[in-house]
Every structure is written in structure tokens, then in C-alpha cells.
């Protein structure tokens, strides 16, 4: 696809970990499957890498809406107190 771009077009490349573009992270406890399984003790299983999922989400959101964060890395429309400005009502 990069070859289809006109010469001189700006490009942004992100190098992400993993071998595909749809990483997953699953975190389940026995109780999530069936509340009665909690009687067997508290066990949790985690599959995947949450950090990789978050990085892909950040890259995709930056690609979809590149101006979603201002120059200070703060979400656009966010006030100094962290509250996002919106219609009053």
C-alpha cells in the first residue's frame, strides 16, 4: 500500500510487538466462570499481554483521530481540573 502513495507523502510507521495486529488480553477468575467455583479458592488466569493491547489501542486511536490529544498530551477539551468541557445543562 505504501507504494500507492504519491511521492513526497508523509508517512508514519509504528513498530509494534507481536506477530499480528489483533493482540488480546483475557483475565478470568474461577468465579467469573461460575460463582460456585469460588469455593475452590481464588485462582486467576491471564492470557496475552495487556501492555501490547494498550499500545495497539493507542496507535489505532492516534491514526483514526490524530488530533485527539493536544500538545501537552492532554485530551482536547479537557479543563485544567481534568473535566472535559461540554455543553452546559
Image (cartoon, rainbow, N blue to C red):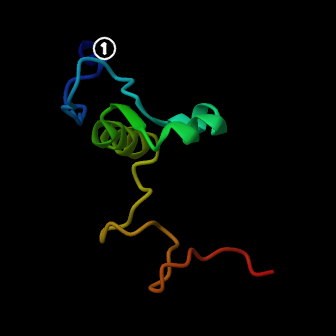
In this orientation, which residue lies closer to the viewer: 46 or 13? 46
Q: Residue at x 44, y 57 (%)?
A: 68
Looking at the image, is 29 positioned above or below residue 68? above
Please indicate whether residue 24 sits to the left or right of residue 3 in the image: right
- The secondary structure type at the circle numbered 1 is loop
Please indicate whether residue 37 sits to the left or right of residue 1 in the image: right
Q: Residue at x 44, y 85 (%)?
A: 80
Label 1 Cα neighbours within 10 Å, binned few <14 / some 14-19 / many ≥20: few
Q: Work out which residue is located at the far front of the displayed protein and give it.
A: 39
The image position of residue 74, as x and y in percent, is 38, 69
- Where's the N terminus, which quadrant? top left
The image position of residue 53, as x and y in percent, is 36, 37
The image position of residue 24, as x and y in percent, is 40, 28
Q: Residue at x 37, y 34 (%)?
A: 46
Q: In this figure, which residue is indicated by the disc labeled 1?
A: 1
> Which picture quadrant has residue 23?
top left
In this orientation, which residue lies closer to the viewer: 3 or 39? 39
How many numbered discs, if any? 1
The image position of residue 16, as x and y in percent, is 22, 31
Please indicate whether residue 23 sits to the left or right of residue 75 in the image: left
Please indicate whether residue 51 sits to the left or right of residue 76 in the image: left
In this orientation, which residue lies closer to the viewer: 76 or 10? 76
Amino acid at each position: 500500500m505504501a507504494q500507492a502513495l504519491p511521492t513526497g507523502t508523509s508517512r508514519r510507521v509504528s513498530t509494534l510487538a507481536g506477530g499480528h495486529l489483533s493482540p488480546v488480553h483475557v483475565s478470568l477468575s474461577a468465579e467469573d466462570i461460575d460463582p460456585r467455583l469460588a469455593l475452590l479458592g481464588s485462582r486467576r488466569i491471564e492470557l496475552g499481554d495487556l501492555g501490547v493491547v494498550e499500545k495497539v489501542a493507542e496507535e489505532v486511536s492516534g491514526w483514526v483521530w490524530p488530533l485527539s490529544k493536544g500538545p501537552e498530551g492532554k485530551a482536547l477539551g479537557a479543563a485544567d481540573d481534568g473535566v472535559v468541557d461540554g455543553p452546559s445543562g
